[in-house]
Image (spheres, rainbow, N blue to C red):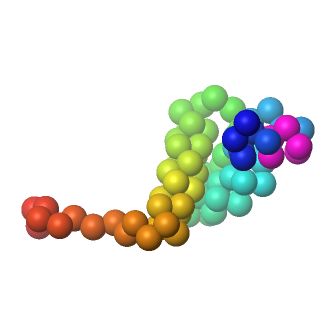
Amino acid sequence: MGFERLVRVLQGKTSNYDTDVFTGTIAEIEKITGKKYDFGDSKQAVAFRVLADHIRAISFTVADGQLPSNPGGAM
């Protein structure tokens, strides 16, 4: 069982994205976009979850020392 699933069970939530792991990030996405997260299956709610998941993943890679770069890429 991964961390997110464990937290979901402990907090009694039905989705990983409804837990403390993601709610802060989703709240910030709401502020930035001016849109409201509806906890449903709408395209907008899915987009919120994708953004939150990608932000979390990028945060871990940066914390592990992998910084974004584009060596040799087109300008």
Rendering coords of residue 4 (x, y %)? 71, 44
Q: Residue at x 54, y 33 (%)?
A: 43
Which is nearer the eye, 48 or 75? 75
Which is nearer the eye, 22 or 70? 70
| Residue 10 as seen in the image, left or right of residue 29 | right
Which is nearer the eye, 14 or 29? 14
Above or below, 51 against 43 in this view is below
Q: Residue at x 69, y 41 (%)?
A: 2
Q: Quadrant of the N terminus?
A: top right
Rendering coords of residue 12 (x, y %)? 89, 38
Rendering coords of residue 26 (x, y %)? 65, 54
Q: Which quadrant of the figure has residue 34?
A: bottom right
| Residue 20 as seen in the image, left or right of residue 53 | right
Residue 50 seen in this snapshot: yes
Q: Residue at x 54, y 61 (%)?
A: 60
Above or below, 13 against 34 in this view is above
Residue 33 seen in this snapshot: no
Q: Quadrant of the C terminus?
A: bottom left
Q: Residue furthest top?
A: 41
Above or below, 1 against 74 in this view is above
In magenta stretch: residue 15: no
Q: Which residues are magenta?
A: 7-11
Q: Residue at x 58, y 51 (%)?
A: 52
Q: Main secondary structure of the magenta part?
A: helix
Which is nearer the eye, 16 or 31? 16
User: What is the number of callouts on the image?
Assistant: 0
Rendering coords of residue 7 (x, y %)? 80, 46
